[in-house]
């Protein structure tokens, strides 16, 4: 959710305000589901230490350790927090910069979490938070989070996609595209390809062109289509899906990039699409700036849509910027002022939990727990064992 901050000078005025006390709500039942706990992860409002209007708390998606013991998330206060998955207590924190408020930490094989600040990539030890390696790609980082088990991929405002060895932080290759990499949640790995958006603008006032490029070892451009991309491409069985600031979802053939279809909503598509199989059919779920979350068939037909809140406006944030996650027959997704559980087949609301601000984070599901960050400055943990 949201666009990376292009003004690097803003980082110079960022501080780390004192962390509010853990608000432990273990076992507290609610008609909106069971909230296990919520823990403060940085900013609760715009002001000292959080100087970016409309960006407080976190839009980053949590990363969960293999056994669920630790949940790691970055905040716009410039800190990466590691919390106990069971009770939300703090294990460690690491100061980076405000860039960590948007990306998803990638847990790599050596047991460290790869995070991106504004200008460097770090691998933070899972036990202590100490940096085991640091890599500066040159220029400001605009996209982070792609990981294929051995390599980490980041995009920069210098129009480059860079591949990094996850073991030691060494540069493997870089590819130059036709614009800045603004894909909000990082490049998407597709087999031996990595796909990302190049170009466009963070705050769109006109039809700024952009492309989606799929790159193999830094050499081969597989897909190139012009539109105003801000979201990370999503991958289905044979198609790549990407949302645009022209309000439309596009589908392209993975083999060669031929255009398949375009279906439009009433608002910009900044959230990354989520592809899921339902009853043998491929379904694409995506949030829109019009305040709804949509489900499309693989042919581009609208299967259902559900209103989660107000549309994006100049005076008040709105729209749906969170990507969905699935557990069983339930979809979990953030809205403008609440977190939602929806029926995966109909979009019907099962429950909601009201928050203090927009939920731009994409939820992480681990077992019977769902973790999600919020711009109100908290990380939330829900027990969803009773959800279908």
Image (tube, rainbow, N blue to C red):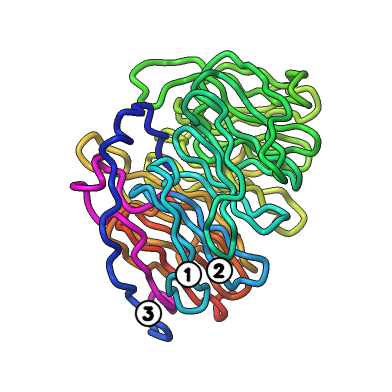
Numbered circle sitting on residue 31: 3
355 shown above or below 47: below
Q: Secondary structure at mark 1?
A: strand
Numbered marks: total = 3
Residue 23 in percent (x, y) is at 32, 75
Res 112 seen here: yes
Q: Nearer the viewer, mark 3 or mark 1?
A: 1
Pointers 2 and 1 in contact (C-beta within 8 Å):
yes
Span shown in magenta:
32-59
Report which residue position mark 2 lands on.
70
Residue 353 in percent (x, y) is at 37, 68
Q: Nearer the viewer, residue 158 or 323?
A: 158
Pointers 2 and 3 in contact (C-beta within 8 Å):
no
Q: Secondary structure at mark 2?
A: strand
**Which comes before the other along the chain, label 2 or label 1?**
2
Cα distance in 3D space between marks 2 and 3: 27 Å
Q: Main secondary structure of the magenta part?
A: loop
Report which residue position mark 1 lands on.
91
Q: Nearer the viewer, residue 55 or 323?
A: 55
Res 264 seen here: no
Residue at 70% across / 43% down in the picture?
A: 168
């Amino acid at each position: 959710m949201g666009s990376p901050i292009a003004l690097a000078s803003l980082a110079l005025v960022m501080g780390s305000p004192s962390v509010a006390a853990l608000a432990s709500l273990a076992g507290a039942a609610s008609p909106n589901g069971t909230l296990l706990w919520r823990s403060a992860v940085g900013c609760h409002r715009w002001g000292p230490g959080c100087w970016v209007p409309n960006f407080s708390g976190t839009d980053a998606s949590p990363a969960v350790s293999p056994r669920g013991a630790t949940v790691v998330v970055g905040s716009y206060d410039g800190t990466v927090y590691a919390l106990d998955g069971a009770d939300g207590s703090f294990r460690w924190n690491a100061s980076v910069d405000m860039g960590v408020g948007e990306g998803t930490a990638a847990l790599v094989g050596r047991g460290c979490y790869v995070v991106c600040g504004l200008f460097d990539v770090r691998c933070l030890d899972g036990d202590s938070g100490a940096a085991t390696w640091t890599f500066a790609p040159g220029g400001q980082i605009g996209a982070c989070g792609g990981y294929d088990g051995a390599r980490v991929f980041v995009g920069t405002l210098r129009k480059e996609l860079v591949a990094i060895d996850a073991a030691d932080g060494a540069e493997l290759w870089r590819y130059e595209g036709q614009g800045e990499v603004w894909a909000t949640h990082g490049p998407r790995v597709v087999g031996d390809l990595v796909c990302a958006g190049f170009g466009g603008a963070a705050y769109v006032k006109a039809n700024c062109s952009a492309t989606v490029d799929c790159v193999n070892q830094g050499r081969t451009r597989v897909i190139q289509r012009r539109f105003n991309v801000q979201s990370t491409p999503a991958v289905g069985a044979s198609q790549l899906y990407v949302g645009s600031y022209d309000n439309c979802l596009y589908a392209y053939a993975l083999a060669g990039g031929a255009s398949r279809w375009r279906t439009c909503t009433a608002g910009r598509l900044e959230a990354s699409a989520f592809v899921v199989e339902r009853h043998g059919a491929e379904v694409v779920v995506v949030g829109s700036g019009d305040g709804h979350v949509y489900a499309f068939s693989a042919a581009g037909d609208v299967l259902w849509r559900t209103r989660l809140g107000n549309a994006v406006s100049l005076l008040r944030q709105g729209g749906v910027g969170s990507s969905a996650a699935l557990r069983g027959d339930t979809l979990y997704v953030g809205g403008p002022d609440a977190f939602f559980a929806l029926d995966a087949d109909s979009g019907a609301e099962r429950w909601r939990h009201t928050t203090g601000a927009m939920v731009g984070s994409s939820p992480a599901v681990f077992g019977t727990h769902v973790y999600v960050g919020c711009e109100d400055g908290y990380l939330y943990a829900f027990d969803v064992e009773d959800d279908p």
